[in-house]
Image (cartoon, grey):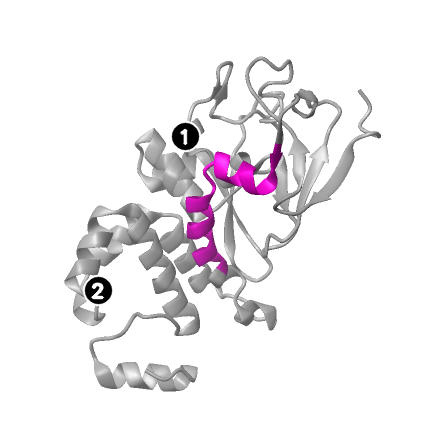
Amino acid sequence: MSEQNDKKVLFTLDDEFTFSCDRTLPCFNTCCRDINIFLTPYDVLRMRRSLWIPSDEFLKAYTVALMGDDGIPFVVLKMKEDRDKTCPFVGAEGCAIYQDRPWSCRMFPVFPVSAEEEEFLIEEKLSCHGFRVNKTSTVRQWKKDQDISKYDLMNEAYKKITLHDYFLKGNKLDPGKSKLVYSSCYDLDAFKRFLFGTRFFDIYDVDEQTIEAIRKDEEELLNFAYGWVQFNLFTEGNLRLKDKEMDKLLQARSGVSS
């Protein structure tokens, strides 16, 4: 079919659209090929945990790391090297990690127009039979049905880094800071080794409850990683040095009062 009659339509959270997808459709799985799927740090956490493999192994086997013009690293899912460039997790029965599929897969076919998510774009492709199914939903209900809330919460913390005023003013990360963002946020196993394999907690003032939380809970660990990155890039957040005088000096340099 020609794509000339495909439609792109803007929706708000409470606008209704028609769409459904399951294995009974003749186009089932065809959308999971030859596409760019950008992975957030939380996507990587969920996906590699679903596979029961370390973060560095997952990143090496299933992703490609790229660099934005501002020096912020980002990660793209690596497709198979077959004719159709299919997703490595998709088979005849569907997605092997469906319960932990990435944010962009959960949202499909809905895409936010901006970071504020006030409007959403839906591209109604004639080749997709999902738009012919008589099942309607609002964007708000779709997000709820796809269990997006936890992803949105975790991704919002990351947006505070990637959409920071520092970058809006034209600043760029140097290679060392780019590597820090990547290793802290995407390679969580490496970040955890850094925390517990060094004198980190002798230098930084972190309470025992938080230490135990990040030792046992990967979501807490990721949130701590976000805080560590904010501290290093912007001297912001709740992280404090145990050396009070040095901490005051850092706060004064950043223009932030303690």
Q: Amino acid at mark 1?
A: Gln
**Which range is magenta?**
137-159
**Quadrant position of residue 70:** bottom right
Q: Is residue 104 visible?
A: no
Is disc 2 in contact with disc 1, using a CB cutoff of under 8 Å? Answer: no
Q: Is residue 66 above or below residue 106?
A: below
Q: Is 241 one of the magenta-colored residues?
A: no
Q: Position of residue 125 (x, y in %)?
A: 73, 28
In the picture provided, is 188 more to the left or to the right than 233?
Answer: left
Q: Amino acid at mark 2?
A: Phe
Report which residue position mark 2 lands on: 200
Viewer-nearest of discs 2 and 1? 1
Judged from the image, the secondary structure of the residue bearing numbered disc 1 is: helix
Quarter of the C terminus within the rendering:
bottom left
Nearest the eye: 22 or 241: 22
Sequence-first tag of 2 and 1: 1
